[in-house]
Amino acid sequence: MTLPYIFIIAVALAMDAFAVSLAIGWTIPHIDTRRTIRVSASFGLFQGGMPILGWLAGQTIHTFVFAIDHWVAFGLLTGIGFKMMVDGIHSGEPTFKSDPTVGIVLITLALATSIDAFVTGTSLAMMETPMWTPCGVTAAITMGLSAMGLRSGRHVRKRFGHRAHLLGGIFLCFLGIRILLTHLNQQ
């Protein structure tokens, strides 16, 4: 597998993480360096690590994972998105009961955006492709795009104010639905 091809795959895998980072950026009142590093490192770790797990799983569970991955991503993203919308509707200024840059929410978002990376890893195993370079490139690109999305989301928040929380929830729900429909159309 050539480096340009690896780069294209890495960017494609990182786009969901970029989109979620953008939504996080416009729902959090203060994006500092610590949050940026935490979010981008988490997304990069999951995007770079899931192909390794997929590669190790190989063909054994590829069919099973491919059959349900889109449902898992849909459920996780729309669940979090719906909660964000409810929080945005019920308060004039968003209350951040659970910070999406820490804990289980961050892990859930990182997992939801990296399920396709797991399936990609199983494909790499079937093609007998070494996994280290694609995983490292994917992790690095995901970290960069996630940091960019998080920082760009700040500007959306400044423009839309308290409605940004509602907008972020709608965006995550839309992303979950898009993932589901894309996979259902491929079957």
Image: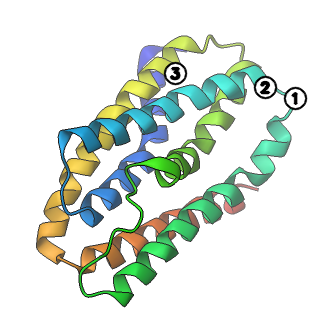
Mark 2 neighbour class, 10 Å CA radius: few under 14, some 14 to 19, many 20 or more: some
Q: Tag 3: residue type?
A: Cys
Q: Is residue 22 above or below residue 62?
A: below
Place residue 100 in its image quadrant.
Answer: bottom left
Q: Nearer the viewer, residue 92 or 180?
A: 92
Is residue 51 found left or right of 56 in the rendered image? left
Please state which amino acid type lies under the numbered disc 2: Ala
Where residue 121 sits, quadrant-wise, is top right
Mark 3 to mark 2: distance in Å?
A: 15 Å
Query: Horizontally, is 172 left or right of 155 in the view?
Result: right
Which residue is nearer to you in this view: 106 or 7?
106
Q: Residue at point 28% right, 44% down? A: 35
Q: Which residue bears the numbered disc 3?
A: 135
Local crowd size for mark 3, using a 10 Å CA cut-off: few (<14), some (14–19), many (≥20):
many
User: 74 left or right of 134?
Assistant: right
Q: Is residue 118 left or right of residue 59?
A: left
Tell me if label 1 and label 2 are in contact, CB under 8 Å.
Answer: yes
Residue lying furthest front: 97
- C-alpha span from label 1 to label 2: 6 Å
Read off the residue under disc 2.
Answer: 57
- Residue 51: horizontal and vertical position, in percent? 61, 28
Identify the colour scheme used.
Answer: rainbow
Q: Which mark is residue 60?
A: 1
Secondary structure under the numbered disc 2 in the rendered image: helix
